[in-house]
Image (cartoon, rainbow, N blue to C red):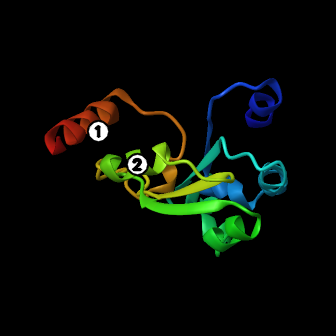
Amino acid sequence: MALGARITGKDFRVFVLLGDGECNEGQVWEAAMAAAHHRLDNLVAIVDRNEYCLDGKVDDVMGIEPLTEKFRAFGWAVVEVDGHDVEALQPVLAASYDRPTCVIAHTIKGKGVSFMEQQIGWHLGYLAPADEQRALDEIRFAS
């Protein structure tokens, strides 16, 4: 999409959301290399760095560090930010760089819901009505 915008003379930015677990896949790095090669300054990849994937802790499944240095080595601008801090995220997402940009958003999986925080079992699956209500109650109480 970012390359298509350039080719057709359209002026828009493309935002891509990646889980940190998928950063162990070759297609991510092929796309990163292509984006830098084409100098896609209209592309922003946001990596949700919560340290968990479907199979467990990301670094136990397949280590991805040093993630910042890898994206930089591929020719990207890299910004690290607290992914839960909306006020910190806004200027980062609004900024323009002369190359593709990777925003590494450090987050806590399930933040704000005590029985979900850092729990691999909640990566996917069924949320029973009682669990839903309990989660909503915790989120509302924290607001």
x and y percentages locating residue 82 in the rendered image:
39, 59
Question: Which is more toward the observer, 98 or 87?
Answer: 98
Q: Residue at x 62, y 61 (%)?
A: 77
What's under tag 1, amino acid-wise? Ala
x and y percentages locating residue 91 in the rendered image:
40, 48
Residue 111 in view (yes/no): yes
Q: Which of marks 1 and 2 is nearer the N terminus?
A: 2
Contact between marks 1 and 2 (CB within 8 A): the answer is no
Q: Residue at x 61, y 64 (%)?
A: 58
Q: In this view, does 86 lie to the left or right of 120?
A: left
Which corner quadrant of the image does residue 42 belong to? top right
Numbered disc in front, either 1 or 2: 2
What's under tag 2, amino acid-wise? Pro
Question: Which is more toward the observer, 75 or 97?
Answer: 97
Q: In this view, does 26 lie to the left or right of 17?
A: right
x and y percentages locating residue 33 in the rendered image:
82, 56
Residue on which disc 1 sits = 135
Q: How crowded is mark 2: few (under 14 residues within 10 Å), some or many (20 or more)?
A: few
Q: Which residue is drawn at 51% across and 55% down?
A: 120
The disc at residue 29 is none
Q: In this view, does 42 lie above or below 105?
A: above
Residue on which disc 2 sits = 91
Q: Which residue is drawn at 41% across and 57% down?
A: 108
x and y percentages locating residue 29 in the rendered image:
80, 57
Q: Is residue 49 left or right of residue 115?
A: right
Q: How many labels does the image show?
A: 2
Q: Is residue 141 above or below residue 47?
A: above
Question: Which is more toward the observer, 132 or 111?
Answer: 111
Marks 1 and 2, how far apart at CA: 30 Å
Q: Is residue 12 left or right of residue 6?
A: left
Which corner quadrant of the image does residue 66 belong to? bottom right
Residue 51 in view (yes/no): no
